[in-house]
Amino acid sequence: MSKTATLQIDGKSYEFPLVTGTEKERAIDIKTLRGVTGGVTTIDPGYKNTGSCESAITFLNGEEGILRYRGYAIEELAEKADFLEVAYLLIFGELPTKHELDKFHADIKAQSHVDEDVKKILDGFPKSAHPMGVLSSLTSALVAFNPSSVNVDSEEEMYNAIVRLMAKFPVLTAWAYRKRVGLPLDYGDDSLGYVDNFVKMMFKKPSGDYNSNKTIVEAMDKLLILHADHEQNCSTSTVRMVGSSHAGLFVSISAGIAALWGPLHGGANQAVIEMLEAIKEDGGDTHKFMQKAKDKEDPFRLMGFGHRVYKNFDPRAKIIKKSADDVLEALGVDDPVLDIAKDLEKEALSDNYFVDRKLYPNVDFYSGIIYRAMGIPVEMFTPMFALGRLPGWIAQWREMRLRKEPIGRPRQVYIGENLRPFKSVENR
């Protein structure tokens, strides 16, 4: 097998090395292209065919429906591990021992207090503020309360920064929710597990005790695991790009939150519920809308089905489908919108049009259903996504800094005006 690729430009040939990953992925290494060709670059809008880095964190094969964190199948992790174990795995490269996991959790608990002045910043937002804007702002504000830069060559400093963010981020996420719905802020309970404590901070009513619901906690745990990393997507690439300037961890994560906020990225599960609401308002005829989805001339699009990366099936959807069924049964929710969701799912899984095209319900479809059943408003869906993605963002930032990757600086092909003389305002 050839180890080089040849590119011909203006009658001249140039050879570039081929890079092969551990899963046999192949890439042409063109970092010397501009130098050896005298200025030629590539153009790849959206970077669909461009590898921005080499990474040992996540392997994704969309054609075969494979997702692995650090070599572990997502199916096995979702079944056998909890979110904190997966976070440790992603960030530090190996599953933790019992001692390492206990220490990680204890250190997170010790750092979970959020400075009271952060509440003043939160108070400055109107109740109508979108939780993603609040979360991004509060995460960035953490820099002011942790002003010293992290020495990335110090394992201790790196570990402490990671622990602080893992500790405070679920608090900020829960506070953004409680601000939105008008509940007093909750500080959590150190006797609870990481995910159970987050659920408590989200849902505890001021007038009653918190009673942990095992089905809810397990479903939330799985959702966070399934969202924990997904290779070089928009928000992850943003975290690495911002971090490549040697910006700190907190502000780099804040930039990732902003990228995730976009409806083409983290807003997909919100779009699912909005679609279901629209179908309900139209009368709830799911068959009618399935027919509309088949009609290429119809602008209607079926949200939560198929995936731009997974061409076969979304492996995360298979896992979370059972959790969605369990949550609906445990909560006994009577919601016509969720009934419509179940009807759409049933029809899509039995209709040859969708089966042949592998347009199966994806993880966004089921996560939207679960959050809806839990009573979480749609504007909070993306912050929940961000909480799950946090360890992946941290892992990617840490890897980028430890590998001492250069500052990100994409090239362009200029298509504007050529040189032209300046005209005074009287002559324009």
Image: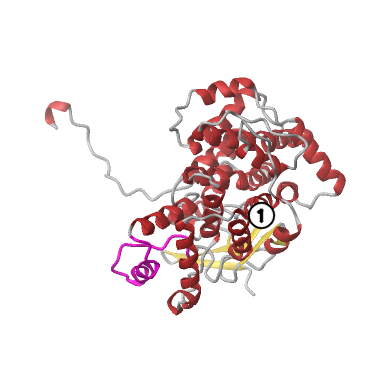
Q: Quadrant of the C terminus?
A: top left
Image vertical order of residue 189 relative to residue 55, above or below: above
Picture residue at 66% right of the left edge, 68% below the top: 24
Amino acid type of the residue tagged 1 in the rendering:
Lys
Residue occupying the point 57% across, 27% down: 141
Please give the range of residues in magenta: 283-306
Residue extending furthest toward the left: 427
Instruction: Answer few, some or many: residues within 10 Å of disc 1's Cα (few below 14, many 20 plus, some between 14 and 19).
Output: many
Q: How is the image coloured?
A: secondary structure
Residue 380: image location, x then y, percent: 51, 43
38 lies left or right of 201: left
Q: Quadrant of residue 403?
A: top right
Q: Is 301 colored magenta in this rendering?
A: yes
Q: Inspect this view and state whether residue 43 appears.
A: no
Which residue is denoted by mark 1 in the rendering? 222
Report if residue 406 lies within the magenta region. Answer: no
Residue 297 rendering spot, x and y as whole percentages: 28, 68
Q: Is residue 79 left or right of residue 53?
A: right
Residue 323 image point, x, y percent: 63, 59
* Whether residue 427 is situated above or below residue 230 in the rendered picture: above
- The quadrant of the rendering that contains the N terminus is bottom right
| Magenta stretch: dominant secondary structure | loop
